């Protein structure tokens, strides 16, 4: 009976040791941070009105 209890205790201890507690774990994979880059320039909204103003000024100057 003692041998059966000893065998049971050793088998439970052995399966608990190999269940992931003692094995080396791989390093966690860290993903690179997402970088958002703005593609439009802030001066893009003023270029067209300035060109329109220059054309109107040129037309007025020729009259």
Image (cartoon, helix red, strand yellow):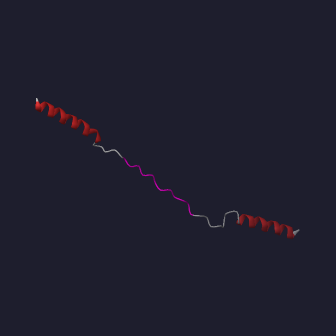
Closer to the camera in the image, 61 or 26: 61
Residue 27: which quarter of the image? bottom right
**Residue 13 in magenta?**
no
The percent coordinates of residue 41 (x first, y second) are 31, 45
- Which residue ends up furthest to the top in the rendered image? 63
| Residue beneath the point at 82% across and 68% down | 7
**Predominant secondary structure, magenta span:** loop
Residue drawn at point x = 29 percent, y = 41 percent: 44
Magenta span covers which residues? Answer: 27-38
Q: Is residue 45 left or right of residue 7?
A: left
- In percent of width and height, residue 13 lies at 75, 66
Task: Residue 28: say if magenta.
Answer: yes
Q: Is residue 20 above or below residue 34?
A: below
Task: Name the spot of residue 23 as percent of width and height, x first.
Answer: 65, 67
Residue at x 30%, y 43% (from the top left corner) = 42
Q: Is residue 32 above or below residue 50?
A: below
Which residue lies at the image location 42% right of the left edge and 52% below the top edge? 35
- Residue 57 x, y percent position in the rendering: 15, 33
User: Left of 37 or right of it: where is 58?
Assistant: left
Camera-side residue of 41 and 15: 41
* Quadrant (top left, top right, bottom left, bottom right) of the N terminus: bottom right
The furthest residue to the bottom:
3
* Quadrant housing residue 53: top left
Is residue 55 found left or right of 29 in the rendered image? Answer: left
Q: Quadrant for residue 29, please give it.
A: bottom right
Quadrant (top left/top right/bottom left/bottom right) for the C terminus: top left
Q: Name the residue furthest front.
A: 62
Front residue of this view, candidates 50 and 19: 50
The number of callouts visible is 0
């Amino acid at each position: 009976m003692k041998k059966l209890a000893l065998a049971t205790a050793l088998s439970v201890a052995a399966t608990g040791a190999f269940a992931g507690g003692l094995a080396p774990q791989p390093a966690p994979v860290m993903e690179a941070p997402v970088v958002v880059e703005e593609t439009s320039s802030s001066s893009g909204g003023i270029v067209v009105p300035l060109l329109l103003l220059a054309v109107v000024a040129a037309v007025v100057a020729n009259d």
